[in-house]
Amino acid sequence: MDLGRISALLHARPAGHSLPQGLYIDDEAFDFDMAAIFGQTWLFAGFEAEVRNPGDYIALTIGRWPVLIVRDRDGELHAFHNSCRHRGSILCQPGRGSAARLVCPYHHWTYGLDGRLLAASRMPNDFRKADHGLRPVHIAAIAGAILICLAETPPDIETMRRELTPLLAPHGLASAKLAVQSTLVERANWKLVMENGRECYHCATGHPELSRTFPANASAYFDLDRDHSQAFEARMAALGVPMGPAGEDWWQAVRFPLNAGMVAMTSDGRFAVDRLMYEAGGGDTGSMRWALEPNHFCHSTGDHSFAFVAMPVSAMETHVVSKWLVHEDAVEGVDYDIATLTDLWTRTNLQDRDFAENNQLGILSPGYAPGPYSPDAESLTLRFVDWYCATAAAYLDRVSA
């Protein structure tokens, strides 16, 4: 990897502008992003609702890196590199499942749910099982959300835990149910997918369904019509509903009002789930939007939560994983139906896929040059790109020291 070229590309970006072409299209830049960004930061990995019981696991892939999250018999969460300590085969195929023990399908080395190697047949007498447990990955659970970090020394997460927990806890994510998950393949660099997902400059014309409920014309960081905002804030204060904002450079959370007369982020603005997750004010609590750099956002409303994750696959391919959570006692076909629950964000994701792929094609042009962001309409996109550049530069400084 030519770190000098990466450094030159980062320094070539004009302040307030998008990135130079190479950072969106080069395989070398993708490898750098995996090492400098995804290999160093805390990443949203899922919800505790997906690993509720001992033996439940999530197997996911971060770029080319397989990772395994599992709950042990004592109820503790663990994350491991999903790679057998014998010859490296993955233990669990991508997805969710449940197992009493983790058994490699190749030579049947067997691990406990806490990662200890329990059995490895036909090894010499001096072989020590204690030296060959699964390699751990840092893991944290915050109000039902699961985060992992692949770095040897992870960034401090205690401010996030302290400030995000009271904002998210009332939404019951820790005891929720995953109603449905989908994966959408996008032929675009992960940063383009996230730049699109961090702004609503395009929403009024590009997302007519989303704009029915979401305040598409908000300025900066959800600065809305003064009268509408003040009335919402007064109502939330009277209900004792926490609003924020809270955050650091790599995460943010704020509760904001939906458009007038709307109570949920659904195609018609009405609840898609009869069994509410947050009952304060009859569930009319706007949206608690929380987001992590580099690749996540979530909207938690009174009736459900929707989570979006952009998983990098290659320089010009990203998989968008979407998850919808509902109350743990909500019954499909009685309290909700999948089509109504998923309609708005499925439409929005498909529209955004087309925007991101079209953006990628244009960036391949020899006529492309970094363009200026709107400080008003694209403030969160600018924040994301500035964070990316600062994080990348800090990594370059560390490895060159």
Image (tube, rainbow, N blue to C red):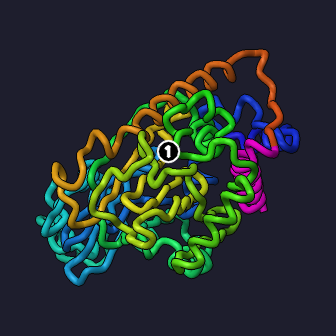
- Report which residue position mark 1 lands on: 310
Circle 1: element type:
strand
Q: Residue at x 63, y 53 (%)?
A: 36
Residue 60 percent coordinates (x, y): 36, 52
Q: In this image, 14 relative to 45: left or right? A: right
Above-or-below relation of 29 to 265: above
Side (left or right) of 216 relative to 184: right
Q: Residue 248's quadrant in the figure? A: bottom right
Q: Is residue 102 left or right of residue 219?
A: left
Image point 20% across, 72% down: which residue? 53
- For the N terminus, give its image quadrant: top right
One can see residue 216 in this view? yes
**Residue 136 seen in render:** no
* Image coordinates for residue 72, horizontal then vertical, percent: 24, 76
What's the residue type where badge 1 is placed?
Answer: Ala
Where residue 79 appears, as percent x and y from the top left, is 37, 67
The one of 42 and 308 positioned closer to us in this rendering = 308
Q: Main secondary structure of the magenta part?
A: helix
The one of 32 and 261 positioned closer to us in this rendering: 261
Number of dots carrying numbers = 1
Q: Quadrant of residue 202?
A: top right
Which quadrant is home to the C terminus? bottom right
Most foreground residue, 109 or 258: 258
Residue 220, image x, y percentages: 75, 51
Whether residue 29 is in magenta: the answer is: no
Residue positioned 71% across, 31% down in the render: 22
Residue range in magenta is 375-401
Residue 379 located within the stretch drawn in magenta? yes
Residue furthest top in the image: 366
Q: Is residue 268 above or below residue 291?
A: above
